[in-house]
Image (cartoon, grey):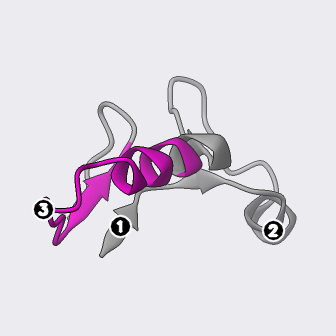
Amino acid sequence: NLSPGMVKTDLLTKCLGNWETPGTRSLKTSDIADVIVYFLNLPQYIEVKECIIQPLGENIS
């Protein structure tokens, strides 16, 4: 289970407009892709059950 925080995508920007405020950070799609590649390169005996990825300072409640 991979749970990312806010990811800046064209769809999100199209739906919400300029949703980012000064001082906030969002993840890029390439950030998520990098994490997936990292997981795929782990040894086969390692099982990742859950991963929450968020920009530094983002509060997920």
- Mark 3, residue position: 45
Q: Quadrant of the N terminus?
A: bottom left
- Mark 1, residue position: 3
Question: In front: 45, or 25?
Answer: 45
Nearer the viewer's eye, disc 1 or disc 2?
1
Q: Which residue is drawn at 58% across and 53% down?
A: 7
Packing grade of label 1 (10 A; few <14, some 14-19, many >=20) is few
Residue lying furthest front? 44
| Badge 3 amino acid | Tyr
Q: Tag 3, which secondary structure?
A: loop
Mark 1 touches mark 2? (CB < 8 Å): no
Q: Is residue 52 magenta?
A: yes
Q: Is 26 located above or below residue 8 in the figure?
A: above
Q: In which quarter of the image is the C terminus?
A: bottom left
Q: Residue at x 61, y 36 (%)?
A: 21
- State the CA–CA distance, disc 1 to disc 2: 18 Å
In the figure, residue 60 lies in which quadrant? Answer: bottom left
- State the CA–CA distance, disc 2 to disc 3: 37 Å
Q: Where is residue 48 in the image (x, y as percent from the top left)?
A: 18, 64
Nearer the viewer's eye, disc 1 or disc 3?
3
- State the CA–CA distance, disc 1 to disc 3: 22 Å
Q: Is 21 located above or below residue 22 in the figure?
A: below
* Magenta residues, start to end: 33-54
| Mark earlier in primary sequence (1, 2) | 1
Nearer the viewer's eye, disc 2 or disc 3?
3
Q: Tag 2, which secondary structure?
A: helix
Q: Is residue 53 magenta?
A: yes
| Badge 1 amino acid | Ser
- Mark 2, residue position: 11
Q: Position of residue 30 (x, y in %)?
A: 64, 42
Packing grade of label 3 (10 A; few <14, some 14-19, many >=20) is few
